[in-house]
Image: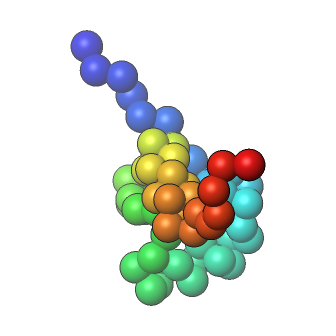
Amino acid sequence: MTAVAERLNKSTAATYLGVSERTLDLWRSQDRGPRSHKIGGRLYWLKSDCDLWLEAQVLQTARGGVR
């Protein structure tokens, strides 16, 4: 049995990522940000995709050493 991925709607995804819904729209139009999916005509982001994207941002923007 496979686990069902947690789907986030635009409002929830924006809150989870700490950005506005408008920013998600902009990222989506520019093929940036976490992957989005249309299911049954509705737009969703998978929490696992958001987590992977956030992790990548931390790695790309890390500065300095261990303090």
**Would residue 48 appear left or right of 19 to someone viewing this image?**
left
Residue lying at the far top in this picture: please name it: 1
Tell me which colouring the rendered structure shows. Answer: rainbow
Give the vertical position of 22 relative to 47 (above or below). Answer: below
The percent coordinates of residue 13 (x first, y second) are 62, 55
Residue 56 percent across, percent down from the top left: 46, 58
The residue depicted at 45 percent of the width and 42 percent of the height is: 48
Tell me the quarter of the picture where residue 19 sits: bottom right
Which residue is found at the position 73% from the left and 60% from the top?
Answer: 18
Residue at horizontal 73 percent and vertical 55 percent from the top: 15
In this rendering, the answer to whether 28 lies above or below 35 is below
Q: Give how far across and how far down residue 42 sits, in percent.
A: 47, 59
* Camera-nearest residue between 53 and 25: 53
Residue 14 appears in the rendering: no
Q: In percent of the image, x 40 and y 79: which residue is there?
A: 31
The quarter in which the N terminus is drawn is: top left
Q: Nearer the viewer, residue 46 or 57?
A: 57
Camera-side residue of 16 and 64: 64
Residue 25 percent across, percent down from the top left: 57, 77
Q: Is residue 57 above or below residue 31?
A: above
